[in-house]
């Protein structure tokens, strides 16, 4: 499959964010962002999702920047997916040192987020991403005491689950889709 790409810009009084994404990439990234941990997490997401990701982001403070990058990334993923059928539902459990995190998601246009995250800023990132991409997202922290490890394991699990869920398929995976007419014998 080719052509599952998008470029999205979000400019507010607080931030200026530009994101280009290719869902059929190989995990290449170019991230320009003043917040080092955010940059590291976006690189991690790109690597584990195998999405090619270009990000240029500046903002007046960390909260505004993290929030607007999440919104823009979610919008870019949603736009790049288009209407083509995908596997839709996926889960990933990722260990990272003391942390063990499970991410389960459904790519459906009913955004919902139940996020277990010890850091309110990153909780907000995952929720904003889910709402803007239109997915149902559940994050469960099974173990972990180091917040850095918990957040990074969550990004790894999110990337892995998104890669699986956005895998192209021949038919729409839904019982609500228009039924196909079966021709009798």
Image (spheres, rainbow, N blue to C red):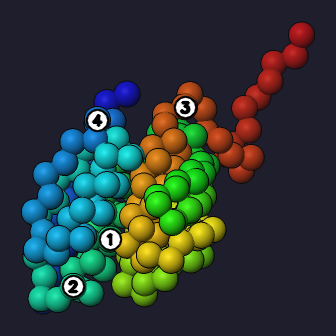
Pick the quarter of the image with the N terminus. Answer: top left
Q: Looking at the picture, how far across and down is residue 79, in whole percent?
A: 34, 54
| Disc sitting over residue 62 in the figure | 2
Alpha-carbon span between mark 1 and mark 2:
12 Å
Q: Nearer the viewer, mark 4 or mark 1?
A: 4
Alpha-carbon span between mark 2 and mark 3:
38 Å
Label 2, secondary structure: give it. Answer: helix
Q: Residue furthest right?
A: 185
Q: Which residue is mark 1?
A: 70
Earlier along the polypeptide chain: callout 2 or callout 3?
2
117, 132: nearer the viewer = 117
Q: Which residue is mark 4?
A: 26
| Marks 3 and 4 in Cβ contact (< 8 Å) | no
Q: Nearer the viewer, mark 1 or mark 2?
A: 2
Q: Which residue is mark 3?
A: 169
20, 65: nearer the viewer = 65
């Amino acid at each position: 499959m080719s052509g599952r790409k998008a470029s999205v810009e979000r400019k507010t009084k607080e931030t200026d964010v530009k994101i280009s994404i290719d869902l059929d990439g190989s995990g290449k990234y170019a991230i320009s962002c003043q917040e080092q941990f955010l940059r590291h997490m976006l690189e991690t997401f790109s690597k584990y999702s195998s999405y090619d990701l270009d990000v240029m982001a500046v903002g007046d403070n960390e909260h505004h920047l993290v929030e607007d990058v999440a919104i823009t990334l979610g919008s870019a993923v949603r736009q790049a997916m288009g209407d083509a059928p995908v596997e839709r539902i996926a889960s990933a459990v990722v260990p990272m040192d003391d942390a063990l995190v499970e991410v389960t998601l459904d790519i459906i246009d009913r955004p919902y987020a139940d996020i277990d995250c010890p850091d309110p800023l990153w909780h907000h990132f995952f929720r904003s991403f889910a709402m803007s991409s239109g997915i149902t997202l559940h994050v469960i922290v099974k173990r972990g005491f180091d917040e850095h490890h918990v957040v990074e394991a969550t990004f790894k699990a999110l990337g892995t689950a998104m890669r699986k869920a956005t895998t192209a398929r021949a038919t729409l995976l839904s019982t609500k889709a228009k039924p196909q007419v079966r021709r009798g014998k």
